[in-house]
Amino acid sequence: MADPRRRPGTMTNGNLAYDLDALVRERNLEEAGKVHEHEREARQPRPQQRRQPVAQPRPRTSPVLVGGIVILAAMVMALIMGYVQLTTISGNVAQMKSELAELNDEHVSLLTKYEQTFDLATVKETAEAAGMSKPTSAQIEYVDLSGSDVAVVHQAGAGGLLSGLGQSLEEGFEALVEYFR
């Protein structure tokens, strides 16, 4: 008869003597698979009351967070506007530099023309082209001013010392202004 403990399809090497250690191993394997009653109770999940989930309040955004975002957006817009103004001003500066270079060139050419107007040969040619000529001796008249070149004006009712002093200061100031003209 076949050994009921032997698994079908396994081979034996012809030795039918029992391996004593094999029984101990099999028993240990069987006991390892069994769960003791007190362990089984501990492993079984306890029936818990089903709780309905509590509705959680909807998270609210903090006013500080909203204010910070608004301030940050305003700062970004100010920065962008600053860059726009900087770009515009840089373009204007470049345009003004090119205009300044053109004006400097024009200044040099006008200064050259101005200096040519005082060239005596150019003045003579321009005067002759306009129909001017040197005066003849018949056209020249001399004026004789051999008389005195001082004029005195008297006022009626001459004042005192203070009015004379004031008048002298006024005449001196007028002479000074006339000198620097």
Image: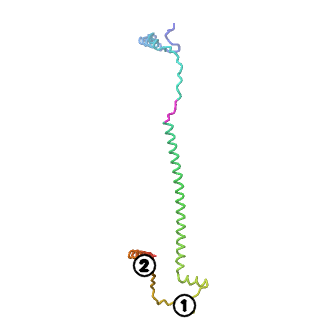
Magenta portion: prevailing SS class: loop
Q: Which residue is mark 1?
A: 141
Residue 157: image quadrant is: bottom left
The reply to whether residue 34 is in sight is no
Mark 1: which secondary structure? loop
Residue drawn at (53%, 13%), measured in percent from left and top? 8
Q: Nearer the viewer, residue 162 or 97?
A: 162
Badge 2: residue crowd in 10 Å (few <14, some 14–19, many ≥20) = few
Mark nearer the N terminus (2 vs 1): 1
Residue type pointed to by label 1? Glu
- On the image, the x and y values in percent for residue 151 come to 46, 84
Residue type pointed to by label 2? Ala
| Closer mark to the observer between disc 2 and disc 1 | 2
* Residue farthest along the front direction in this orientation: 157
Badge 1: residue crowd in 10 Å (few <14, some 14–19, many ≥20) = few
On the picture, is 99 further left or further right than 164? right
- On the image, the x and y values in percent for residue 150 come to 44, 85
On the picture, is 109 further left or further right than 36? right
Mark 2: which secondary structure? loop
Residue drawn at (50%, 8%), measured in percent from left and top? 4
Residue 61 vs 77, above or below: the answer is above
Residue drawn at (52%, 31%), measured in percent from left and top? 60
Tell me the tag on residue 160: none
User: How far apart are labels 2 and 1 at the CA level?
Assistant: 42 Å
Specify the segment rendered in magenta. 59-63
Tell me the tag on residue 158: 2
Residue 153 vs 77, above or below: the answer is below
- On the image, the x and y values in percent for residue 103 come to 54, 67
Q: Nearer the viewer, residue 138 or 110?
A: 138
